[in-house]
Amino acid sequence: MSDPRHIAMFGFWACLRNALAFGMLLIVLFAAPTHAHAASDLPIATRVLAVGDNQAGRIIVDFDKPVEVQHSLLEEPWRLVLDTDRVVFGFADHEKSFTGLVGDIRYGDMDASHSRMIFEFSDPFSIRSIKSQDAGNGLPFSIIIEYRASDPQAF
């Protein structure tokens, strides 16, 4: 015959295991929507486009809501750095379109509250203007950067 104490002890561990599994399930179910909700409050970069030739051009970055941008320039290789509060990058690498002096973009989160985009240029350039455009009526908020070719000394 089985020892009743053994059966009672086995029942205790089975109940404890089930209670822990249920507790973990509750944590996963209730913690995930909070994180997803926080991410949905962030602006989403929906499109990035660079058009132009070897003399001048324009970079357009569309967002689903307004963002503030700070910029800086880095030389050799020639780069434009755009810093923002944290955003979600909603465009895929194959959706990027670049012509003119802009060759590529790198982007990502700097930390929990800041994001960065780095545009790589083939030659020195100067920024003519950086404008924010809120078109309204369901159209995207855009950051529009106009640039022109320059020489290394003027950069």
Image: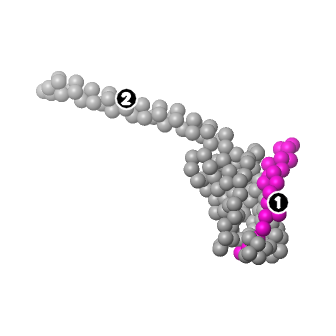
Residue at image coords 74%, 75%: 153
Residue 10 lies left or right of residue 41; in this view the side is left
Residue 71 placement: quadrant: bottom right
Magenta includes 125? yes
Q: Which mark is residue 19?
A: 2
Position of 117 with respect to 138 (left or right) is left
Q: Quadrant of residue 102?
A: bottom right
Is residue 121 within the magenta segment? no
The x and y percentages for residue 86 are 64, 48
Q: Which residues are magenta?
A: 122-145
Residue at the extreme front: 153
Q: Amino acid at mark 1?
A: Ser
Type of residue at label 2? Ala
Position of residue 103 relative to residue 38, above or below, is below
What residue is disc 1 on?
129
Q: Does residue 96 appear in this view?
A: yes
Considering the numbered disc 2 on the image, is that residue within a helix, a strand or a loop? helix
- Can you say which quadrant of the picture contains the N terminus? top left
Depicted 41 relative to depicted 90: above or below: above
The quadrant in which residue 92 appears is bottom right
